[in-house]
């Protein structure tokens, strides 16, 4: 951190800066360089951690994921989302997979987790892996590998994934609520959530690219239909089309209809650059999508990814590795759960 940044940080702290306060952008940056998340875990993750202890692991992930995608083409999007939620809330240690107990409400039961899905797919893969290599492979690594396979099976890059994570032993509802970026947020607030997690502005744009296979409930962008909205649709006909869909042609109340739409309407099941192309023509679905193009800090990246698939794929690989290291447990920390949903 430069002396100027240090001074700015101290000043912001002195005026009782809160995490995410847009008035203190330097403090946000400063906070990041002070964070533990930037230090590699000891021992670090590595490629091929299970090559000797569970040689069939990659084949099992591949076979099981292909099987589950055949059952439901939305599986990749949902598994990838599960991985994001796990890493953002308290780190990639499979706490999102834990069921609540009679005394502790888990991340899974937070309101923001209600639309998460496919816990059964991870539990099924875990069961298969346990049959081949009992007590060896963590749920956190299974989720990371399944997320990478999801990207590949949706037509995205073949991602290299580090392994060696161990599973956490706690999961708190409040952890999930406090950590997830929201659909109604613009860059300053989104960035604050990413920085809090240990990521940066570039990661924000790159990882939002996962919305190329995403889906969203109408209630997450309903605020944009108001003519006086904080983030109206730049292309009014697109907004009108979404409003008509979300209200069944104006005859329904979208909160009770509970409808969902794809985020990349051009190619919803294909991991490609059309999410970024859509933002350029004003067809971002959520405020948090369109903000990536509307903000001068992130617009150049959106344009770059929209024009270069290789660049997006390489960048996505880099950000996934970075996200996959957030607050991981390695070595003798944590445990290897037998069932991903059950407290060890
Ligand atoms: C696209 O990005 C790749 C990877 O960064 C780069 O090597 C290539 O030159 C870029 N292509 C164009 C046309 O800019
Ligand atoms: C977790 O809870 C769900 C119901 O909420 C249940 O279907 C599932 O079997 C539980 N998982 C485990 C591993 O007990």
Image (spheres, grey):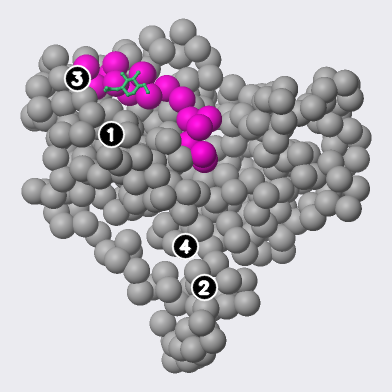
Q: How crowded is mark 1: few (under 14 residues within 10 Å), some or many (20 or more)?
A: few
**Which residue carries the number 4 mark?**
195
Look at discs 3 and 1 and give the one toward the viewer.
1
Q: Residue 270, relative to residue 312: is it above or below?
A: above
> Mark 3 highlights which residue?
129
Residue visible at 23% across and 29% down?
A: 342
Q: Please name whichever residue, 302 or 92, is drawn nearer the observer in this view of the structure.
A: 92
**Main SS category, magenta section:** helix
Q: Percent x, y for residue 232?
A: 83, 48
Please state the horizontal and vertical placement of residue 129, each as a whole percent of the image.
19, 19
Q: What element carries label 1?
A: loop
* Magenta segment: 111-127
175 horizontally vs 343: left or right:
right
Kindly identify which residue carries mark 1: 101
From the image, state whether disc 4 or disc 2 is nearer to you: 2
Mark 4 to mark 2 CA distance (whole Å) = 13 Å
- Describe the element under mark 3 as helix, strand or loop: helix
Q: Mark 2 points at which residue?
A: 18
Above or below, 77 against 5 in this view is above
The 10 Å Cα crowd at callout 2, few under 14, some 14 to 19, many 20 or more, is: few
Secondary element at tag 2: loop
> Residue 15: within the magenta?
no
Badge 3 local density, few (<14 within 10 Å), some, or many (20+)?
Answer: many
């Amino acid at each position: 951190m430069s002396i100027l940044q240090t001074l700015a940080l101290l000043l912001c702290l002195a005026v009782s800066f809160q995490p995410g306060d847009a008035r203190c952008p330097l403090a946000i940056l400063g906070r990041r360089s002070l964070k533990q998340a930037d230090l590699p875990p000891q021992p670090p993750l590595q490629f091929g951690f299970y090559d000797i202890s569970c040689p069939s692991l990659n084949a099992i992930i591949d076979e099981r994921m292909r099987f589950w995608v055949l059952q439901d083409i939305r599986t990749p999007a949902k598994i990838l989302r599960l991985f994001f939620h796990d890493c953002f809330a308290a780190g990639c240690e499979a706490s999102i997979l834990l069921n609540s107990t009679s005394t502790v409400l888990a991340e899974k039961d937070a309101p923001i987790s209600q639309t998460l899905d496919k816990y059964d797919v991870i539990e099924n893969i875990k069961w298969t892996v346990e049959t081949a290599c009992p007590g060896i492979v963590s749920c956190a690594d299974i989720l990371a590998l399944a997320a990478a396979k999801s990207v590949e099976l949706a037509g995205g890059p073949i991602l290299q994934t580090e392994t060696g994570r161990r599973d956490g032993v706690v999961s708190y509802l409040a952890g999930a609520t406090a950590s997830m970026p929201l659909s109604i947020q613009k860059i300053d607030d989104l960035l604050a959530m990413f920085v809090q997690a240990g990521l940066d502005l570039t990661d924000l744009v790159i990882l939002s690219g996962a919305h190329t296979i995403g889906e969203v409930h109408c209630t997450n962008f309903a605020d944009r239909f108001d003519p006086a909205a904080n983030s109206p649709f730049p292309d009014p006909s697109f907004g009108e089309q979404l409003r008509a869909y979300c209200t069944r042609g104006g005859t329904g109340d979208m909160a009770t209809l509970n409808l969902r739409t794809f985020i990349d309407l051009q190619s919803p099941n294909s991991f490609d650059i059309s999410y970024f192309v859509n933002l350029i023509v004003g067809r971002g679905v959520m405020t948090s999508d369109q903000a990536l193009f509307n903000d001068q800090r992130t617009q150049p990246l959106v344009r770059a990814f929209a024009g270069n698939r290789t660049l997006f794929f390489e960048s996505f690989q880099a950000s996934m590795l970075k996200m996959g290291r957030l607050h991981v447990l390695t070595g003798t920390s944590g445990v290897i759960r037998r069932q991903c949903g059950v407290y060890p």
